[in-house]
Image (cartoon, rainbow, N blue to C red):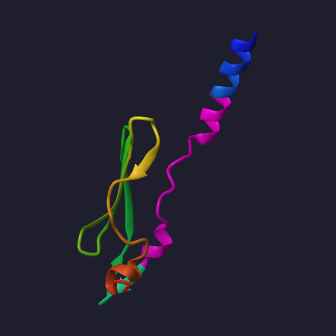
Amino acid sequence: MKNRIFSLLVLVALACACKGVRFMNPKDFDASIDGAPVSLYTLRAGDISLQVTNFGARVVSLYTPDRSGRYCSIVVGHRTLQEYITPPG
């Protein structure tokens, strides 16, 4: 009985630790630069999700699961279009 309770607690803890993918907000990339519209696009295939903007065809994020099944972006990029135009710092 103790093993069942322990197993149930472990499963509940793992389920709580699993977080969904938190994509970048497309509204942060909606703009018009030199009269051309700029947008953020999300492409999904299986376990991989790619976010790309048409502002210089930049890859903004690439989410993939690690060995534990947790999703994280493996691209070092900015969170908004404004940061691509005028980098912080």
Which residue is depicted at the point 74% across and 18% down?
5
Choose between 28 and 64: the one closer to the eye: 64
Provide the residue span drawn in magenta. 11-30
Q: Answer with the quarter of the image where residue 67 lies.
A: top left
Which residue is depicted at the point 40% across and 83% down?
82
The single residue placed furthest to the bottom in the displayed view is 34
35 with respect to 12 (left or right): left
Check the image and report above or below for 68 versus 27: above
Check the image and report above or below for 26 versus 42: below
Which residue is depicted at the point 44% across and 76% down?
30
Check the image and report above or below for 63 versus 7: below
Q: Answer with the quarter of the image where residue 53 lies.
A: bottom left
Residue 33, visible in the rendered structure: yes
Q: Answer with the quarter of the image where residue 57 lies.
A: bottom left
Quadrant of the drawing holding the N terminus: top right
Residue 29 screen position, x and y as percent = 42, 74
Which residue is depicted at the point 70% across and 14% down?
4
Choose between 38 and 87: the one closer to the eye: 87
Check the image and report above or below for 5 versus 52: above
The single residue placed furthest to the front in the displayed view is 2
Residue 8 screen position, x and y as percent = 69, 22
Residue 36, visible in the rendered structure: no
Quadrant of the drawing holding the C terminus: bottom left
Residue 7 screen position, x and y as percent = 66, 19
Q: Is residue 75 magenta?
A: no
| Count of number-bearing discs | 0
The single residue placed furthest to the left in the displayed view is 56
